[in-house]
Image: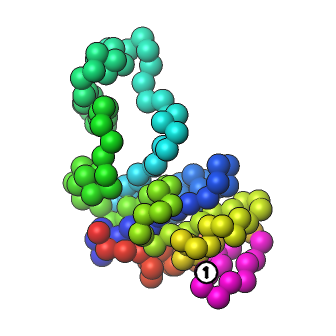
């Protein structure tokens, strides 16, 4: 099993990051390699500190790659599509995508509080504490990590 992808959606503070982190840890504990792509539609994420050289290099307009003994960080002044982003990962077993709700990809929408039915149109499943009943959308209990991971194994897309 190599290169399986699943997307996760939900409004801000719905529990997406918490669930993706738990799912990633579950699979990594079984020696699978996991990669995660996070969509930042508001361009709000900060990745560097204004006092650091890499920030100054990026502010100059150049694309910047920082290599260290434990990580590689790439800062680009261009948007990558999903295919280009996936190609940057050398090898993986699971790819989890947070956001990009209109992307044609098997998808779990996450709701730790109120369930928003507007997400049902592009979701294969809803992970929530409150059980939902919908003919085209499976319900996954947020308390059942193994059940969620089993759903991912059975419903992910090969990429």
Q: Is residue 47 shown in magenta? A: no
From the image, which quarter does the C terminus lie in? bottom left
Q: Is residue 69 above or below residue 135?
A: above
Residue 44 seen in this snapshot = yes
What is the tally of numbered marks visible in this picture? 1
In x, y percent, where is residue 15?
A: 65, 55
Residue under the point 29% across and 61% down: 92
Q: Residue at x 67, y 49 (%)?
A: 13
The percent position of residue 84, horizontal first and vertical second, equals 25, 52
Q: Which residues are magenta?
A: 130-141
Camera-side residue of 119 and 68: 119
62 on left or right of 30: left
Location of residue 64 (image quadrant): top left
| Dominant SS type (magenta) | loop
Question: Label 1, on which residue?
Answer: 137
Residue plotted at (32% across, 55% down):
82
Where's residue 50, x and y in %?
44, 15
Can residue 22 be seen here? The reply is no
Instruction: Determine crowd level at label 1: few under 14, some 14-19, many 20+ residues with C-alpha closer than 10 A.
Output: some
Kindly state the secondary structure of the residue where label 1 is placed: loop
Rendered view: 32 above or below 152: above
Q: Is 66 on the left-hand or right-hand side of 112?
A: left
């Amino acid at each position: 099993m190599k290169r399986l992808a699943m997307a996760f959606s939900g409004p801000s503070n719905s529990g997406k990051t918490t669930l993706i982190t738990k799912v990633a840890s579950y699979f990594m504990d079984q020696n699978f390699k996991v990669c995660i792509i996070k969509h930042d539609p508001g361009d709000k994420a900060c990745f560097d500190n204004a006092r650091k050289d890499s920030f100054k290099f990026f502010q100059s307009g150049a694309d910047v790659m920082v290599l260290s003994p434990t990580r590689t960080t790439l800062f680009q002044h261009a948007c990558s599509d999903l295919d280009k982003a996936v190609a940057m990962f050398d090898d993986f077993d699971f790819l989890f995508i947070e956001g990009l709700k209109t992307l044609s990809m098997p998808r779990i929408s996450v709701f730790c509080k109120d369930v928003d039915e507007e997400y049902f149109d592009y979701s294969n499943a809803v992970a929530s504490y409150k059980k939902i009943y919908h003919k085209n959308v499976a319900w996954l209990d947020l308390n059942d990590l193994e059940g969620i991971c089993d759903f991912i194994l059975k419903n992910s897309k090969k990429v």
